[in-house]
Structures are given as C-alpha cells and as structure tokens.
Image (tube, helix red, strand yellow):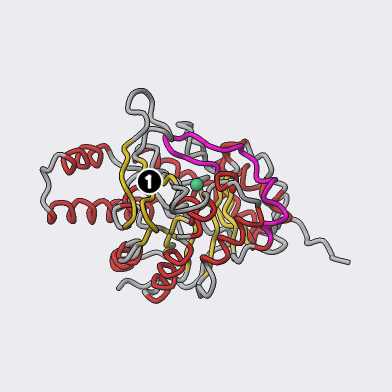
Amino acid sequence: MPTSPSTLPVLPTSVIGSHGLPGWMYSALEMIDSGRFGPTDERELFDDAVNMAIRDQERAGVDIISDGEMKRWKFVQSFYRRMTGLQAQGPLRKLGPEGYDSVPRYQATERIKAPQGLGIVDEFNFLKQHATHRLKATCPGPVTISIHIRERPSVYRDRLELANEFVDVINTELKALVAAGADYVQIDEPSHSIIGGSAEDYVDLYNRCVRGVRARIALHICFGNLASRARFERTYAPLFPAIMDARADELVFEFANREMREVELASQITEKFDLGAGVVDVKSFHQEPPELVASRIRKVLDHAPAERVRIVPDCGFFTVPRWLCVSKLTNMVAGTMIVRSEVERGSRRGPRRRQRV
Ligand SMILES: [Zn+2]
C-alpha cells in the first residue's frame, strides 16, 4: 500500500465526495441498463472510474481525496438496491428538466434493513489500495439516505421515525470503515427542515449515528445539489445554536454559491469545531480563477483562525462534467496556495480568539 504523508499543510484542501462524471460514464450506465455489460465489465468500468477520479484529484494537488463516489448513482440511489423492505415506485415525473421529482422513489412496505451494509467499506478498501494521498470516506446521513423513500403510516409514523431507522445502519458502517483503516469520515446531510422535526431532533439523530466512531468526523450540511438545484432555504441560521452540540470535529458548509453569505458563522463554528469552508461553486460553470478563490478564503479568515480551516468545494461534483470539476479543483488548490503562503509568511493569521469571560 502506498504511504500517506503524515502531516498536512495549513489550510488543507479536500473534496466533499463526488467527482465529475466523464461523458463515457453516462454511455456506459445506459449500456448497463440495457443489459450489455456482464458483471466483470461492470466491475472493470467502476474500478477504472475510481482510478480516474483518484488521479484527477491527486494531479490537481488536493491534499485529502475521496474515491469520487464513482460507484454510487445519483448520490444515494445505489444504496436502495442493498435494502430490504422497499418497493420501487419509479419517478413521479419523467418528462422535462431533471429535478427532485424525476428520480426513482421507493415506498417502505415493512421495516427497512440493510443486511449487507451500505457497501462503503468496499469502496474505501479499493480507494486505500490505489491512492497515495490522505483519504476521506463519505457516508450519507439518515436524512439524506431516506430522502427518496416515502414513509407509510403503517410502517413509519413520520419522516423522523423513518430517518431513525438508518441510525444503526450508518453507525455500523462507520465503525466498519474505521476498522478498515479510515481515519477521516464525513456524514452528508441536507437542511434539517425535511424531517419536519426541530434542529435539536436533527442533531440528536446525527449524534447517534456517530456514537463510538473513533475517527476524525466531519458533518457536511448543504441545501441540496441534485441537477445543480437547491431544495431548501439557503441559510444555516435555523441550525444554530443546536448544531453546536454535534459530535463532530469539523462542520463543512457551503459558502461560494451564496457569495459568501453567513461567512461570519465561521467565528462561532471555530470556537468549537474546525470549519470545512466551501469556496468553489459546484453549481456554476464559472471557472473561478485562483485569485477569486483566494479572496473567498481570506473572507473566511476574517472570522476564523487559519489552523481551524479546511478548504473544500461547496458540495460534490456529480452534477458537473469531469473537465469542469478538474478545472475547479485545480483552481481551488491554486487559490489555497496563494493564501497558504500568506499565512506561512505571517501576513495573514485570522482573528485572535476572543477571551471568554
Ligand atoms: Zn452537499
């Protein structure tokens, strides 16, 4: 196994998880659906795709990489194939632009189980064997993973109870990831509003997923990214102060596509957590030049000390083409290098911590 560098630079760069799919992947997925691939062909395709994602991230200079989530489909859809107690219902809408109502849906017919786990450990084992950089493993949270499932009153009272069903599934997967060597895991969740409960319910749900998981834990919260569209009101404010009780080492928030709105939250967040700051807009075709990325990072450092900040894109890249994803990652790293050298020269440190009285 290749060795990993043991120390990270200040303002380490990483990704949220998914990599941009090349055009040939779409063609290959259609061929799989039409029955033209055998199991060996499929395995080779997905392994090659992961290796491509690894090389793209490493060549861009990203410090901590993922497997690009190349073995998943539409972020969570491939997990449903591993579950029992679900009945496929097809999309609500098949015509017109892609959106949240045009992906396959499922209904719970009995209590849902994932007897063989979510498969993320296998993804991580492959990544570990083929990468040379530091690694991050990603897992959808209970709200995200239940997003396309309709609760049925006879099985689950409401969305909160449905999401609760996945707490043990996720906790087991995370512990297996750590046993497989993962030292950095990220849970991906959208806004809390979808479950209808309070922010406290949401944080409690998340906290039970990571109980006893002995790794660096990041919690990524965003506003939705399917077909590059948000699904929720784009503000983190309703999560505070409840989110400060999250059992996490790092909160990973999107800022770039909101023109750095709410960046002042970095101050409160870094009183307790590290901040993964989204400074590249994954929903825009604008190839933000390095100097623009640098200016966004400086805005974060107006509110947070550099040693508490990690640099990431706003969200995953699965909704943009590969070439654009690579361009954005390359510019993200170049922009980070500008500010990193300023920090290392001592000309930019971030604010001094307030003295608590
Ligand atoms: Zn996201």
Q: Residue at x 33, y 24 (%)?
A: 95
For the residue pair 300 and 315, the one nearer the viewer reads as: 315
Check mark 1 vs ligand 1: CB closer than 8 Å? yes or no: no
Q: Is residue 347 shown to the viewer in this render?
A: no
Q: Residue at x 12, y 47 (%)?
A: 37
Quarter of the view holding residue 319:
top left
For the residue pair 300 and 229, the one nearer the viewer reads as: 229
What percent of the width, then of the height, locates residue 61? 43, 54
Q: Which residues are magenta?
A: 223-244
Q: Is residue 303 shown to the viewer in this render?
A: yes
Q: Residue at x 32, y 54 (%)?
A: 55
295 sits left or right of 123 in the view? right
Q: Amino acid at mark 1?
A: Gln
Magenta run includes residue 230: yes
- In the picture of the structure, the residue carrying the numbered disc 1 is 107
Q: Work out whether 51 lies above or below 289.
A: below
What percent of the width, then of the height, locates residue 137? 42, 62
Q: How many marks?
A: 1
What percent of the width, then of the height, locates residue 138? 43, 59
